[in-house]
Image: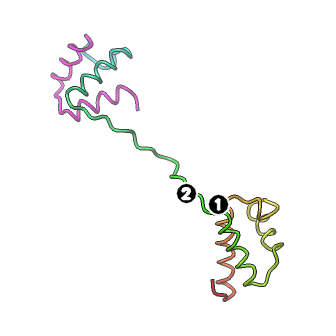
Amino acid sequence: MSSLAKIHIAKSQLGLDDETYRALLARVAGVRSAKELNPRQIGAVLAEFERLGFKPTAAKRSGRAAPKPAVDRKALIGKIEAQLADADRPWAYADAMAKRMFKVERVEWCDSDQLRRLVAALTYNAKRNGRTV
């Protein structure tokens, strides 16, 4: 967020009318408009707004989702092993799935997210073939 945006947010948060706002700018920085402020004056104006009660808030993060907690790889490998045993399939079957799904030669080389997705695929296959999960 730009400094000018912060100044305008502070103005509205404090409920200042245009005349009072411009008087504050003139008193603190000697200007009548926020776009005439240099960086040092912007800091002084923001400090004055904070003295008057402005509470700056952190900008909301957008875009990326919060990272998922790391799942124990050993537990995921155990689930894969159990599903393979239940389906009477060899480890080569899981390796082939990993290669097809993620372009990874062996299940042991998959990361936690890939292992989680492999478990989901095996679960889907078990349900489709009438096996209990």
Instruction: Identify the mark at residue 113; answer none if there is no mark.
Output: 1
| 7 drawn magenta | yes
Determine whether 101 is above or below 59 in the image: below
The answer to whether residue 2 is left or right of residue 121 is: left
Q: Quadrant of residue 30?
A: top left
When the figure is inspected, residue 115 is found, relative to residue 81, above or below; the finding is above
- The three-letter code of the residue at mark 1 reads Asp
Does residue 53 appear left or right of residue 118 in this picture? left
Q: CB under 8 Å between callouts 2 and 1?
A: yes
Where residue 110 appears, as percent x and y from the top left, is: 73, 60
Q: Residue at x 82, y 77 (%)?
A: 90
In the image, residue 26 sits, relative to residue 5, either above or below, namely above
Please indicate whether residue 89 sits to the left or right of residue 115 in the image.
Answer: right
Q: Secondary structure at mark 2?
A: loop
Residue at 35% across, 25% down: 4
Task: Choose between 78 and 130: the one closer to the eye.
Answer: 78
Where does the C terminus fall, quadrant-wise? bottom right
**Kind of residue at disc 2:** Lys
- Position of 110 compared to 31: left or right? right
Viewer-proximal residue among 80 and 38: 80
Q: Which residue is mark 2?
A: 68
Report helix, strand or loop for mark 1.
Answer: helix
Q: Quadrant of residue 127?
A: bottom right
Q: Position of residue 17 (x, y in %)?
A: 16, 28
The residue depicted at 46 percent of the width and 46 percent of the height is 62
Q: Which mark is residue 35?
A: none
**Magenta-drawn stretch, dominant element (helix, strand or loop):** helix
Which stretch did the figure color magenta?
A: 1-30
- Quick one: label 2, few (<14), some, or many (20+) residues within 10 Å? few
